[in-house]
Image: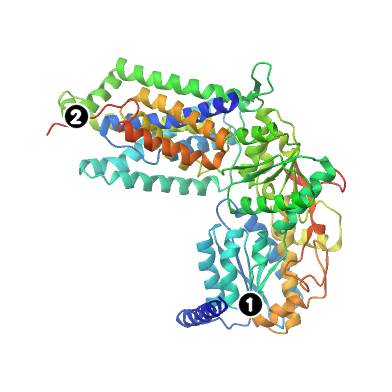
Amino acid sequence: MAILSSRRAILTGITGSILAGLTGCTRQDGMIRIGLITALSAQSAKSGEAISRGLSIAIDDINASGGLLGRKLELIRRDDESNPGKGVIAARELLYKEGVAILFGGLDTPVARAIVPIATAARTPFVVPWAAGTVITHNGTDPNFVFRVSAVDEQVDKAMVAFAQAHYRTRRPGLIMLNNPWGQSNEKGLKAALATAKLPAAGSERFEHADVDVTPQLGRLRADGADCLLMVATVGPSAQVVKSLDQMGWDVPIVSHWGPAGGRFGELAGPHANRVKFVQTYSFLGPDNPVKAHVLAALKAKYPDIKEPQDVTPAVGVANAYDAMHLAAIAIRTAGSTDGDAVRRGFARIDRYDGLIKSYRAPFAHGQDALGEADYIWAEFDKGRIVPLPAGAA
Amino acid sequence: MVPALLTGLALGSVYGLIALGFHITSSVCGAVNFAQGSSAMLGAVILWMLAQAGWPVPVAAIAAIALCGLYGLLVERVAIRPFLARRSDAWLMATVALGLVCDNGMMLVFGAEPRSLPSALAQSSVRLGQTDLGVYPLHLLIPIAMLLLAGGIDLFRRRTLHGIAMLAVAQNRDAARIMGIAVPRVIAAAFALSSALAGVAGMLIAPLAHVETSMGVVLGLKAFAVAILGGLGNAWGIVAAAILFGLVEALVTLGLGSGYTQIVTFLLVIVTLALRPDGLLGRAQVRKV
């Protein structure tokens, strides 16, 4: 298998070199190119725009302070339309034609997973500011070129169970999961977390993206004695769960992965949207600090639609991307070059960075994920805004 | 079980309204708009946009139905008439292609994000008897709307001159032309009516789900299954098939979970068609050679 992998890497490298030759080679105009592959159209466009904004503000910071290694940074974006095939094409173009020093991307876990082998073969660091699939960073490659500044499914699942126990004293939680790879992966993670917590599940139900009515699944969970729901679903389907609960007249707490945060959940779910408590990595409505004040001011100056902190939405996209770009800049500085292998080692040698989300201490010294369970916060929708829950509240 | 069955009945009725459109055009000219789902999406999206612009909802709904009718005329003119005139079956692909153009074009106008279309009929559920089981009033209204519209179409076709003209075109196009009936106009009207019905279906389902430009794809597919199941040539067969389809969907979801809903429902469609190739109430067509 190892031989096969290395052959594949060599073949990909040769193909890439030929491609670069045919398409005009890597650009040599003095700029350090930063690639971004994310959804800029379709349902997740708003989240993709948030990542773009976080990276842009960070790049403006870095360029204003003289750039990196004496060179300015330039952001090059490509739209993957949440489609792994389009993500792969974009990755090849950015890596081999545009010659990006670091590739950011992966709003959707399937897209990120598709890009991992391409970035690895090109020996270019791939930094994920959103997709939470555990396998993205736990990908079995050595050396591992993938780094993440975002939530990790496996740890979110543990955090969901802990939150449900602490705040709702659940004894029999029910699982309601979207029937897709993300939902199925989290179903396993939640069952493992429940087993660790010695909590029996009332049941585990799946539903489809296009389901208008989720009452049959919820009815079974209610009949099986569920006292709290653990939910993993995207915006629209999460809203259908809330509507179905309203229809049934079942007032049960919902602890959710961050799916509802990616769009207009407050509008779609209606007046009871706030019964869903979901995980986040950051909120601009949380505690003040100098980095937050600077980023907010920069966002207001650059984007006219941002007038108040609540206008920065989804905040996790902006915050994760902002911190990820600054961490990548430190890695390049530490490496002293834009060579992929050197930058990868640079990530592992990052000592300290006082960022927007937290003060990072050796974030990649012992793994590929900069954020962990202790960094998650909990939030709910209030009048269409995502507001963090005060510590200890539910 | 009762609320799930009522919900299934409502969803089945939405498929039925769209499927009646397949029946109307098929019986007049032998062709259908395979992208009927796009017409359903148009109804919901236009209603949402007009309501957002401050139009009173009843006025916005009438305008949306009228615009769906206009879209039906466009479908007939662009994707049906040129191909029927050449006795080509390429309208199959042309209607699908026009539907894709419509869906993607509307995404540019409406945006990619799903939006909510609140309705007083889907705000608070009504309790069933003394139980804690509930359904929204809209769940009860949708089947009634389908039955009324199906009955209205039946009366229209049997009791009005325009309706009788449609039947005449359906039975013998050449004879109808000789009798002075404007055949192209009748066919165009059938497509307008078909799209308007789908638009009504889209408007009815939107408050229970949400409005988005991709919402018509699954609706259109299931509606076509309902139309074939009931018998393309029999409106009341389609109504019966719609009710059956919705109830089976609900029962399978209730009993096995939604992972099995499509598998079992469409397997049942295949088995039913194997036993009754012309649908539940359809009649075999006799072709004289």
Query: Label for residue B230?
Result: none
User: Residue drawn at (53%, 29%), measured in percent from left and top?
Assistant: B8
Which quadrant of the rendered structure holds the N terminus of chain A?
bottom right
**Mark 2 and mark 1: span between their CA atoms?**
70 Å
Q: Position of residue A18 (x, y in %)?
A: 47, 82
Amino acid type shown at disc 2: Val
Q: Position of residue A247 (x, y in %)?
A: 65, 29
Query: Can you identify the residue that label 2 sits on?
Result: B286
Q: Given the current orientation, which residue lies at the most extreme left position?
A: B289
Q: Is residue A324 left or right of residue A13?
A: right
Q: Position of residue B257 (x, y in %)?
A: 57, 38
Which quadrant of the rendered structure holds the C terminus of chain A?
top right
Q: Nearer the viewer, mark 2 or mark 1?
A: 2
Measured along the vertical axis of the image, is residue B225 above or below residue B240? Answer: below
Q: Looking at the image, what colour scheme do you see?
A: rainbow
Q: Is residue B173 left or right of residue B143?
A: left
Q: Residues within 10 Å of mark 2 (few under 14, many from 20)?
A: few
Q: On what subunit does the disc labeled 2 rest?
A: B
Q: Nearer the viewer, residue A53 or B259?
A: B259
Measured along the vertical axis of the image, is residue A386 above or below residue A93? Answer: above
Task: Please count the marks in the image.
Answer: 2
Secondary structure of the residue carrying numbered label 2 = loop
User: Residue drawn at (55%, 70%), measured in percent from left and top?
Assistant: A91
User: Residue drawn at (69%, 52%), measured in percent from left and top?
Assistant: A305
Query: Label for residue A101?
Result: 1
Measured along the vertical axis of the image, is residue A212 above or below residue A188? Answer: above
In this view of the protein, can residue A268 be seen by the observer?
no
Secondary structure of the residue carrying numbered label 1 = loop
Amino acid type shown at disc 1: Ala
* Residue A236 occupies quadrant: top right
Q: Is residue A368 left or right of residue B49?
A: right
Q: Residues within 10 Å of mark 1 (few under 14, many from 20)?
A: many
